Amino acid sequence: MTKVLFHVDESVMWDLTIRNLNNFIKDIDEEFSIAVVANGDAVNGYLDAKRSDQMRMLSKHVTFVSCLNSMKKEHIEADTLPDFVKIVPSGVVEIAKLEEKGFHYIKP
């Protein structure tokens, strides 16, 4: 099984990340697991209505993760995020844990 981790830490990178996710899902020919970890100002991307709709469709195949530390810095409350977003205390710790589990790191 191929396991990949997309790391998004800048809001301007969301469109590229979503394109990369769609291409990955379309082109992979084996079982896969995908996680997207957002930290920094990229956590704001979860609040964008258009992107949120795209992410909701992708959430059938993708685990979306938000860093609580970054949410606090950006003044984002947990209940304002879409229900498919998993919140973790620290995005960088989550990245390290996923890499330990064999996820390949991708930074769009």
Image (cartoon, grey):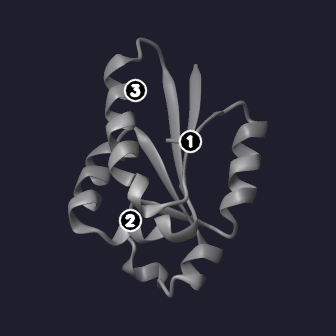
Q: Nearer the viewer, mark 2 or mark 1?
A: 1
Q: Examine the image and state in which quarter residue 39 appears.
A: bottom right
C-alpha separation, residue under disc 3 versus residue under disc 2: 20 Å
Mark on residue 45?
2
**Residue designated by label 1:** 107
- The answer to whether any part of residue 91 appears in the image is yes
Give the percent coordinates (x, y) of residue 21: 38, 36
Q: Secondary structure at mark 1?
A: loop
42 lies left or right of 23 = right
Give the percent coordinates (x, y) of residue 30: 46, 13
Give the mark nearest the N terminus, 3 or 2. 3
In the picture shown, does residue 68 fall above or below 103?
below
**Residue designated by label 3:** 24
Q: Which residue shows up at 29% across the image and 61% down it? A: 52
- Going by the picture, which residue comes out furthest to the front? 12
In the picture shown, does residue 39 fall above or below 16?
below
C-alpha separation, residue under disc 3 versus residue under disc 1: 14 Å
Give the mark nearest the N terminus, 2 or 1. 2
In the picture shown, does residue 25 fall above or below 68?
above
Q: Nearer the viewer, mark 3 or mark 1?
A: 1
